[in-house]
Amino acid sequence: MKSILITGASSGIGRAAAETFLEDGWRVGAIARRADRLEELAATSENVVALPADVTDAKAMEDVFTRFSKIAGRLDVLFNNAGMFGPAGPINELTVEDFEQVLNVNVRGMFICARLAFEQMRNQTPQGGRIINNGSLSAHNPRPGSICYTTSKHAITGMTRSLSLDGRPFDIACSQIDIGNARTEMVADLTARAAREHPEEPPMPSMDVADAARSVLHMANMPPEANVQFMTVMATKMPYIGRG
């Protein structure tokens, strides 16, 4: 049975991905801070390992990776998904603490998890595995008022490229999925904010979060000699090309 660790698995894209991988017969290690939601997910399948922890806590994450690897026998894939949008607005209306909070989760947390996955994949037999980082359309083109989030997601693209290069000698592939307006709690919050600020505008185009989850599954199921380096999956009518 193939195994995957998914961070941010209690809701949104992470929860949808966990359900999709379970349907495909994977063993899923579900990581998030909200233990009650993870236990709810675990009650649906014996192939779920609920792993409540904060991705920014390096020691807790080390314990989580060790526990899951012992249960699953190996780690085939990490879906490095946990993240937050954070406060929105022009830079002079944000605090340094706002910026640090977003980078702590979106960059430091993803670094911690990628480091642990890389270590496990490098030393297991057979060697290798796959790390899939959740980027964003904001890794390419920002939304207005998103400097904290956009900066963090540009950093993830650099992380993905570096991991891809460093992983080659050890059969560790790394890829990035950039998802636009999947119907999650975060996108619901952004939609509500846009409606308050521009009530005359139509609602933001969005797509079913299950479509994003199936895209992650496709990336994870690639054979070892192939990799989807970057994938963009988004609501068809959202203003991505040419937005600014």
Image: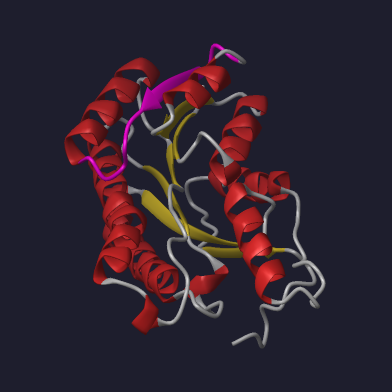
**Magenta highlight: main SS:** loop
Relative to 78, 234 lies left or right: right
Question: Visible in this render: residue 180?
Answer: no
Which residue is rendered at x = 31% and y = 62% of the image? 103
Relative height, residue 112 to residue 191 (above, below):
above
Name of the residue lying farthest toward the left: 59
Q: Where is residue 157 in the image (x, y as percent from the top left)?
A: 40, 69
Question: Visible in this render: residue 220?
Answer: yes
Relative height, residue 66 to residue 113 (above, below):
above
Q: Where is residue 148 in the image (x, y as percent from the top left)?
A: 39, 71
Relative to 156, 214 lies left or right: right
64 or 193: nearer the viewer:
193
Residue 48 inside the magenta-drawn segment: yes
Residue 47 inside the magenta-drawn segment: yes
- Residue 192, by quadrant, is bottom right
114 or 141: nearer the viewer:
141
Which residue is rendered at x = 65% and y = 29% of the image? 24
Relative to 113, 41 lies left or right: right
Which residue is rendered at x = 64% and y = 49% of the image? 184
Q: Where is residue 65 in the image (x, y as percent from the top left)?
A: 29, 30
- Residue 244, by quadrant, is bottom right
Exactly how many numbered labels are in the figure? Answer: 0
Q: What stretch is highlighted in magenta?
A: 45-57
